Amino acid sequence: ASLVRELQRAGRRSEALDWFHRTRRLLADELGVDPGRELADAYTDVLRGDDEADGAARRGGAPAVPDSGRTSSSTAASASPSPSVTAAPPGSASASSSVTAAASASTSAPATPPSISPSASASAAPSASPLPPTAVTPPAPPAPPIPAPSSTVDLLPRMPRGFHGRAAELTALSRAAAGEAPVCLVTGPAGVGKTAFVAHWAHRNREQFPGGLLYADLRGFSDTGEPALLEVLREFLLALGVAPRRIPESARGASALFRSLCADRRILVVLDNARASEQVRELLPGGAECVTVVTSRYRLRGLIASDAARPVPLDVLEPEDSTALLAAVLGQERVLAEEVAARRLAELCGGLPLALRVAAARLADQPDWPLSSMSAELSDESRRLSLLDVEDTGVRAALRLTVRRLPDDAAHHFAHLGQHPGTHVDRYAAAALAGTDPETAAAALDKLTAAHLVIRTAPDRWTLHDLVRLYARGLETGPDALVRGLDHSVATALAAADAAEPGDESCFTLPTDFRPPQATREFTDREQAMAWYAAERDDLALAAAAARAAGLHGRTWRIVLALWPQIVWRVRDDWTPLLRTALEAAQADGDARAESRVRALLGWVLTEEGRTSEALAHLEAAP
């Protein structure tokens, strides 16, 4: 309780509230008990903005004072005449306790004298000319109070430090916050800085909300579990001045009271880290002048449909803003001294603010460590995620919490996407990797898109952020996912070749252990097939490299040979390195027919490049 009060006195209200909740959870988990009266009172005082004396006065007692300063009630009564007081209005806290306050002797005088009827005052206090006893009229039952607006209500987290960029998004949020009772939905992947973004905007616009600034972490993606709806509403109601005993016991009743209190006020309500739309709906204020800002890693389409929420998507930072964030932590001079290394560092962090801050924290801890050294270490994909974790904060921890919330089918497909050697997938590739059908894969990809784990770049084309891909690659999938993905590439490339050059004999037979996908993309004509080749060339080259690295030589040369219509059509597009890879694989596989076909293609390409002698050597060496 003392720490909570000291944090409040220091102006660190959000830390005081956080410390209370951590202590409450610890008491519940370890001892199965609730916080004691002193800690609960300290929490209530922080919510109301009271200091210890104000809080004690409101509760009808006095703060503790040294023994030398105490005065007994009898001494105080004899030294001064009885105060002239009037009856408290029905429904007030004073009225409900007037009789007991007047009739009982206290060891210390209350900070504010209790309001009692004149007759009760005369019978309870000493007087030179006592009046005859008079019956005390009991007060009317208390009604729920409607507290006056308080400009001190502020539950926001502190202003984020080192905030950079986001000018367009800040403007978009201000635009979304205009109008009647707007609900703004700030979404983005884990680590993109949604909380810092909203906190920055809220502090910058705090003067627009004289009715108060409310904030709740809904912990939708947290190890500590989500708070109960009534717990959040109780914190809001206490902050708005509702006495603890007047808060309804049901979430529905508390929500109704919250909406009524907000009806005539201009309040900002920030609901951070929401997992689902139903977490949010009962926390929406009722006033037309109120603004609600929700943050989530999910797109919360249900909230858009039911409450006309206005999306404000956040993406990774631009390169200039990424280096500015590094400079904010490391200092401008250090970043300017290694501009190229700083840009490379920002690129390896993928512009993700969380990754950039962790990398900067490591560098700040070692002031003599060059930025180029950090960039070199991050270039190792096997170590990158571990380097972007520090204590309990980091990219891997943030992604783990997101993936843990996925439905089983989406989690299954996400793990298998990590085995895809390319940068993009369609529903057919995702289905082949996961061992499902394209319709199931498309539904899973839609859920992953809503969770900001994959990015839709075209109607049937998705990609992953580099750090997300590295995380997925480390998940357990079994040994067959890569083979299924490679066989999908072979099958689709053969289908494209049949459409591009109808009537031509297939350039190879399928391996005996070939695993055909449940469905393969169909091509209606040459134009469609050649468009697919152009879009997938880089991914097919990556697939061939992955097959070679895995020692799957037969699949390596088959993937390359299946590209022959594209190679012939765009013969000058630097095919030589890929064909040399296929040649090595055919030789390692001991397939003379495959070697002959690869050498023939390589000879053609080299001839077109003007390298006639090399071309002739390959043609002569063909089996």
Image: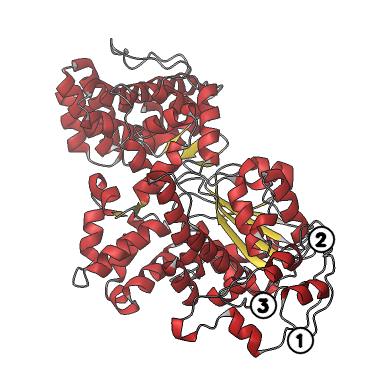
Q: Do the residues labelled 3 and 2 touch (CB within 8 Å)?
A: no
In the picture of the structure, the residue carrying the numbered disc 3 is 112
Say which amino acid is labelled 1: Ala
Residue at left offset 50%, top offset 71%: 159
Residue 575 or 429: which is nearer the viewer? 429
Tell how many labels.
3
Residue 72 falls in image quadrant = bottom right
Q: Which amino acid does label 2 sit on?
A: Pro
Marks 1 and 2, Cα distance to the nearest angstrom?
27 Å
| Residue mark closest to the camera, 3 vs 2 | 2
Of 603 and 304, which appears nearest the observer? 304
Q: Dot 1: few (<14), some (14–19), or many (≥20) neighbours within 10 Å?
A: few
Dot 3, how many residues are within 10 Å of its Cα: few (below 14), some (14-19), or many (20+)?
some
Label whose residue precedes the other's in the sequence (3 or 1): 3
The answer, for residue 440, to whether it is visible in the render is yes
Name the residue: 74% across, 83% down.
83
Crowding near the residue tagged with mark 2, few <14, some 14–19, many ≥20 C-alpha atoms within 10 Å: few
Q: In this view, does 448 lie to the left or right of 472?
A: right
| Placement of 310 over or under 335, stated as above or below | above
Say what secondary structure mark 3 lies in: loop
Name the spot of residue 311 as percent of width and height, x first. Answer: 64, 52
Residue for badge 1:
128
Q: Distance between the residues labelled 3 and 1?
A: 24 Å
Of marks 3 and 1, the one in the foreground:
1
Q: Which label was assigned to residue 521?
A: none
State the colouring used for the structure image: secondary structure
Residue 472 lies, in percent from the top left, at 36, 37
Q: Residue 138 carries which label?
A: 2
Task: Name the residue rendered at 16%, 23% in the picture.
Answer: 587
Camera-side mark, 1 or 2? 1
Q: Nearer the viewer, residue 566 or 378?
A: 378
